[in-house]
Image: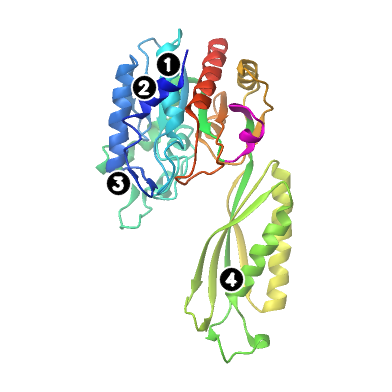
Amino acid sequence: MIGAKDLAELLLDLEPIGRSERGTTRLAWTSEDEATGAWFERAASDSGLRTERDPAGNRWALPEAPGPWWAVASHLDSVREGGRFDGALGVVCGFAIARRSPVPLAVIAFADEEGARYNTPTFGSRALVGALHVEDVLSRVDADGVTLGDAMRGAGVNPRGLDGAPAWLDRLRGVIELHIDQSREVAGLAVSCAPVLGLAARMRVEVDLSGAADHAGTTPRGERRDALLAAARLIVRADELAGPEMVSTAGRILAEPNAPTTVASRVRLWLDARAPQPEQLDAWWEGLELATRDLEATTGVAVRASVASLNRGITFDETVRGALSSAATRAAPEIVCFAGHDAGVIAQRRPAGMVLIRNAAGVSHAPGEHVDLEDAAAAARVVEAALEVLV
């Protein structure tokens, strides 16, 4: 039976990679990423699996039996100064399951799930399903001026081969992803883990507000065209429009001239909105458009808002969900996950499902996240039992 000790042994050599007193940093296409790849190869070998890397940089641990296979998957990269379990614990559970499974299973570590270096979240899984805009992402530049294409080459992955990644999807019958809960929802259910119904709908909005620079002390309020003040009002209105079931986040804001004694002349603002149902996002966007027109009329600031990306959410495969729910030792309702995950991308083309592991702290993308390995082992056993039915 998979126990906490099995997971602790697998984590022993993985956890120190990229870890400091400020958190864990394992960005894609870096030396830390290479080190996790070496760990992946060792874990695969110890599990009786061979390793391959596809054209998108996804790492595969494969059985000798002919495919296609079911796979247990997650990711090994992290955000900057993140937590030690986010993504990595799912891959660890995958190896623990594959070692004991009476049927051949694959383990996958998807490349660049977080997208922290180049703003390319779910890079590897999107490449697999043919949903990656290759020319756009390869030209992106990181904080040091290095393009994604050059970073991939430095990591031993030829960016010109990205178009060939979807052919690898034929190796998969389906995917189950284990991941820490990035909220307190599972903890609130008083269970070790919970199956996921689906992923929430998500919208990213970019807003450009153009006003006029002026003196912060001598310009009367009625004569100002303050782009930053208008942005603040729009942020508050976006939150009000979200209501109790949605979330709206102003994740990034850039102001010009960004001087303490000058009225802001221009602001660029990014809003992230998520909802259980896509129709709720539609209503939120309609309300936001009305708010931009009202702002223009009352502030004299030109406001241009556009949808930068839209994901209408995904409901996971009914058969996979049924197997996971039946395998759970304690009944837990299916929950909607508000984070993006590789399993949600793969679900567009193959049967997929997810299990979230209790995170008592409710903290994610930060060192304060916490998972009891007994809970993680229980989740791994649920997936193990479900795969015996699915395979």
Display colour scheme: rainbow
How far from the left and from the top, in percent, is residue 381? 52, 17
For label 1, the crowd category at 10 Å Cα-Cα, with few meaning under 14, some 14 to 19 and many 20 or more, is many
Q: Which type of secondary structure does the marked residue at label 4 adopt? A: strand
Circle 4 residue: 209
Residue that lies at the very extreme toward the bottom in this rendered image: 218
User: Is 322 situated left or right of 268 in this image?
Assistant: right
Contact flag, marks 2 and 1 (Cβ < 8 Å): yes
Q: Which residues are magenta?
A: 183-196
Q: Which residue carries the number 3 mark? A: 151
Q: CA distance from mark 1 to mark 4?
A: 53 Å
Left or right, 200 with reference to 340:
right
Amino acid at dot 3? Ala
Which sits earlier in the primary sequence, circle 4 or circle 3? Answer: 3
Of 379 and 127, nearer the camera is 379
Q: Determine the image quadrant of residue 327.
A: top right
3D distance between C-alphas at marks 3 and 2: 23 Å
How far is disc 4 from disc 3 in space, using C-alphas?
Answer: 34 Å
- Label 1 or label 4, whichever lies nearer to me, is 1
Going by the numbered disc 4, the residue's amino acid type is Leu
Residue 98: which numbered mark, if any?
Answer: 1
Give, as a three-letter code, the residue at label 1: Ala
Task: Give the mark nearest the N terminus, 3 or 2.
Answer: 2
Label 1: which secondary element = helix
* Mark whose residue sits in front, 1 or 3: 1
Tally the numbered discs: 4
